[in-house]
């Protein structure tokens, strides 16, 4: 059987792209680690980085430091890390699979569905935190299934999926507005706090479920990276290359939606993280950009936003306020760029 070998300059270019991707991904991992430690250092009681690492790794026995680091700050830091990885990974799956930089769970209805179910659990059923988290997960899954069924016409196209998703999102938001208008002031305030999103509000159960989901799903997504690259070439080309187009697309969308659901369950619908992470990672790593890099960029955004919200502003704010401040200008720039380049879908 004949074997076709790529020219030397092509092989050299691939090696350079892989090397750049590995170096950038390693640098992003270092930044994530530094922000993770910094999150556990700062606060009303300063803890040195050495003491933080020693406490987390159980290298020393200091009750005061252990209580501050492990019980108070580690859950918030771990939530920010896991939520960022989940949203960054899910966002880049949506954008690459649907072929549009605007294809983000924030805008195609998945986050809105999670929000509607969570707000209903808070205001209508007066549910506790665990039930609210479960409702958010169920809402994300059911909304995504509805959008998929409505967008199906002998297959899925990115443009149709996004337009139907935006319509579903607006429908969900209108119902959320109605439910809020019928609620008592205290309950409405609690629901609005959830809708903004914050990494400091999750319970132990939600955090553990999110971490397990990230540890299980992200490796699965990485294993499907090659079929995903085939799908980016178009359905016909992917089929010619041997990819099972619809099963792979459905599997990837399902994994991304589960990540969004668990992230929303733990921290609420943090806006713009999924939208920003993938394009930033691609710009940093180049054409060989990886899903891992997108997840790390998402973690950097959430960890950095939480640090700013908690320690650098005059008043302590939810994390979602800062991600919104970061994301809104990016969205305006993205819309202007897409319109100029004619990449509507």
Image (cartoon, rainbow, N blue to C red):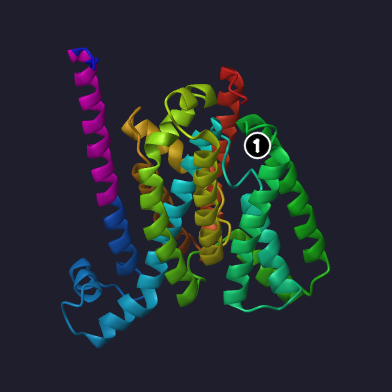
Left or right: 293, with 150 as reference point: left
**Figure quadrant of the C terminus:** top right
Q: Which residue is drawn at 27% across and 85% down?
A: 64
In this view of the protein, which residue sits in the foreground, 52 or 1?
1
- For residue 86, above or below residue 240: below
Residue 61 magenta-highlighted: no
Q: How crowded is mark 1: few (under 14 residues within 10 Å), some or many (20 or more)?
A: many
**Figure quadrant of the N terminus:** top left
In this view of the protein, which residue sits in the foreground, 236 or 217?
236
Residue 66 place in picture, x, y as percent: 27, 81
Left or right: 308, with 166 as reference point: left
Residue 25 place in picture, x, y as percent: 28, 42
Residue 338: image quadrant is: top right
Please say whether residue 326 is visible from this viewpoint.
no
Left or right: 30, with 337 as reference point: left
- For residue 206, above or below residue 268: below
What residue is pinned by disc 1?
A: 162
Q: Which residue is drawn at 45% across and 32% down?
A: 243
The span shown in magenta is 8-30
């Amino acid at each position: 059987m004949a074997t076709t070998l790529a020219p030397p300059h092509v092989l050299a270019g691939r090696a350079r792209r892989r090397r750049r991707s590995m170096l950038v991904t390693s640098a992003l991992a270092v930044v994530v680690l530094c922000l993770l430690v910094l999150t556990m250092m700062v606060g009303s009681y300063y803890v040195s980085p050495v003491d933080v690492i020693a406490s987390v790794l159980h290298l020393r026995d200091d009750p005061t430091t252990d209580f501050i680091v492990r019980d108070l700050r580690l859950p918030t830091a771990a939530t920010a890390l896991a939520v960022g990885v989940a949203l960054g990974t899910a966002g880049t799956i949506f954008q690459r699979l649907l072929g549009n930089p605007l294809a983000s769970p924030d805008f195609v209805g998945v986050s809105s569905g999670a929000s509607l179910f969570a707000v209903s659990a808070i205001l209508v059923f007066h549910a506790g935190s665990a039930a609210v988290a479960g409702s958010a997960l169920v809402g994300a899954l059911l909304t995504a299934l509805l959008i998929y069924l409505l967008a199906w016409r002998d297959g899925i196209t990115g443009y149709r999926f996004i337009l139907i998703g935006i319509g579903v999102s607006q429908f969900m938001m209108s119902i959320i507005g109605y439910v809020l208008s019928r609620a008592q002031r205290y309950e409405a305030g609690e629901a609005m706090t959830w809708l903004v999103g914050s990494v400091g509000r999750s319970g132990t159960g939600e955090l553990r479920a999110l971490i397990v989901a990230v540890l299980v799903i992200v490796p699965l997504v990485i294993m499907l990276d090659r079929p995903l690259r085939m799908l980016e070439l178009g359905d016909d080309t992917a089929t010619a290359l041997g990819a099972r187009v619809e099963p792979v697309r459905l599997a990837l969308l399902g994994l991304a939606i589960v990540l969004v659901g668990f992230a929303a369950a733990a921290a609420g619908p943090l806006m713009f993280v999924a939208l920003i992470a993938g394009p930033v990672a691609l710009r940093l790593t180049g054409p060989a950009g990886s899903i891992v890099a997108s997840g790390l960029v998402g973690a950097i955004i959430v960890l950095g936003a939480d640090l700013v919200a908690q320690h650098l502003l005059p008043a302590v704010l939810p994390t979602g306020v800062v991600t919104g401040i970061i994301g809104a200008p990016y969205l305006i720039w993205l819309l202007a760029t897409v319109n100029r380049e004619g990449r509507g879908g």
